[in-house]
């Protein structure tokens, strides 16, 4: 449906970004290990769905696969209903085959998207045989925005759990904006309470940590149930665990930060579709997760309201190039689940350049460092 998040599974995206953490894990004909570091392709991916640009949230090697990339897209909310809408992904001047992506206003079933084969419909049910009980570990409980940022998360966070046999099939919800508590035959509980699910697969579950008040770090249980099989691990929660979303889905490099009132990333011109540097004095919308409890809490798994806004209980400190930036809003992004938005003004004293660091600190806890492009004031 328009405005939804979808996963596209594709091959042929070329060499991944290699570093000391993953170079020994990527071998011809060998499955990329579950729990391995998030690894995007070396070349940026963009996408067109229904004739409109689809925001590429992330593109990474799928754990447990051989040569398969998982691309997370945010569909344009203004897409018209069209049972024969088309989808392509591209890198540089290279464009994939065209596949059909039916755009509807409601209904549907559990689907996954596949852009790997010519003529294969994108909305295609995929079944997996149910194998051994699900397995995972405490260290596989991570922040979806910054998977290498530790294993203690904050209430309200968008989180990922990696493992094996976590689900019998790949599944995404077919209705927005409220998330389901059962998806693809899988349920998850945290401290005994149900957890809303974004996505399930045999090797990964994306979910929202429920919103509640914490005064310090605690341990609790997380249980995954698939049919009659369950697994339970101990996880850590703390009041704040800020993490900035980045275009490589790994928590480093270019921030997923928009120039306010536009769809333009604050990045070097031409680095991404419609991107341009932010100018001194302009306003930005920084996207993050893990900023903790909010006022006007939405119901569990429901999108944040348009009004009154769900503001963070503590105002974060944001620096751009080491210079404090005035924060005009900090809270859950209206219309989204678990996604926080921080609106700031680029300060007069900020340095200029293509990769100026930004950091968010809340409750004394700093986020990962990401970058934006900044130009002088006109």
Image (cartoon, grey):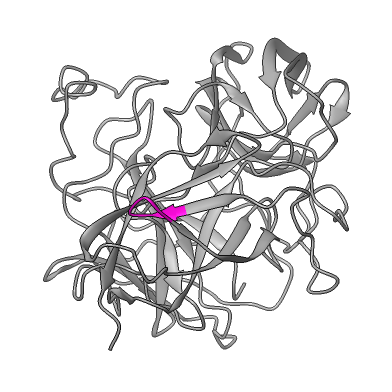
Name the main secondary structure of what is drawn in magenta: strand
Closest to the observer, 118 or 256: 256
Closest to the observer: 250 or 283?
283
Q: Is residue 70 visible?
A: yes
- The quadrant of the rendering that contains the N terminus is bottom right
x, y percent for residue 116: 29, 54
| Residue in view at x 42 percent, y 59 percent | 256
Number of labels in the image equals 0
Q: Is residue 128 visible?
A: no
Residue at 29%, 22% in the rendered image: 31
Position above or below: 241 against 234: below
Residue 359 rendering spot, x and y as whole percentages: 44, 47
Residue 11 is situated, as x and y percent measured from the top left of the image, at 25, 48
Image position of 376 (left or right of 184): left
Residue, far front: 349
**Quadrant of res 64:** top left
- Seen at 18% across and 39% down, the residue is 17
Residue 264 picture quarter: bottom left
Does the magenta portion include 322? yes
Q: In the rendered view of the protein, which quadrant contains the C terminus?
A: bottom left
Looking at the picture, tell me which residue is in the foreground, 212 or 6: 212
Which residue corresponds to the image point at 13% horizontal and 25% vertical from the top-left? 28
Residue 57, above or below 88: above
Viewed as shown, does residue 174 lie left or right of 118?
right
Instruction: Give how far across and how far down residue 66 sits, in percent.
Output: 27, 30
Per the image, is 281 magenta? no
Q: Which residues are magenta?
A: 319-323
């Amino acid at each position: 449906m328009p405005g939804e998040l979808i996963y596209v599974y594709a091959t042929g995206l070329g060499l991944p970004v290699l570093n000391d953490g993953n170079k020994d894990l990527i071998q011809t004909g060998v499955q990329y290990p579950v729990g391995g570091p998030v690894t995007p392709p070396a070349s940026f991916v963009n996408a067109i769905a229904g004739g409109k640009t689809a925001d590429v949230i992330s593109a990474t090697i799928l754990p447990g696969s051989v040569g398969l990339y998982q691309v997370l897209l945010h569909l344009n909310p203004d897409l018209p209903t069209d049972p024969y809408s088309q989808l392509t992904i591209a890198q540089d001047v290279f464009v994939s085959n065209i596949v059909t992506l039916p755009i509807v206003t409601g209904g549907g079933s559990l689907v996954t998207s596949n852009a790997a084969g010519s003529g294969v419909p994108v909305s295609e049910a995929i079944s997996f045989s149910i194998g051994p009980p699900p397995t995972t570990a405490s260290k596989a409980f991570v922040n979806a925005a910054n998977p290498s940022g530790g294993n203690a998360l904050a209430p309200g966070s968008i989180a990922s759990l990696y493992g094996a046999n976590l689900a019998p099939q790949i599944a995404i919800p077919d209705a927005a904006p409220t998330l389901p508590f059962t998806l693809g035959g899988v349920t998850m509980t945290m401290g005994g309470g149900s957890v809303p699910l974004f996505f399930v697969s045999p090797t990964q579950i994306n979910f929202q940590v429920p919103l509640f008040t914490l005064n310090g770090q605690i341990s609790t249980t997380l249980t995954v149930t698939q049919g009659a099989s369950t697994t339970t691990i101990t996880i850590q929660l703390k009041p704040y665990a800020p993490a900035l979303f980045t275009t490589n889905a790994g928590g480093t490099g270019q921030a997923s930060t928009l120039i306010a009132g536009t769809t333009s990333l604050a990045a070097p011109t031409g680095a991404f579709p419609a991107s341009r540097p932010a100018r001194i004095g302009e306003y930005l919308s920084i996207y993050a997760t893990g900023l903790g409890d909010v006022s006007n809490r939405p119901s569990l798994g429901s999108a944040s309201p348009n009004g009154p806004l769900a503001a963070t209980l503590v105002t974060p400190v944001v620096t751009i190039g080491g210079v404090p930036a005035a924060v005009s809003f900090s809270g859950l992004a209206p219309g989204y689940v678990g996604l926080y938005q921080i609106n700031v003004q680029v300060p007069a004293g900020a340095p200029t350049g293509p990769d100026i660091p930004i950091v968010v600190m809340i409750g004394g806890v700093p986020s990962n460092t990401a970058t934006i492009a900044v130009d002088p004031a006109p």
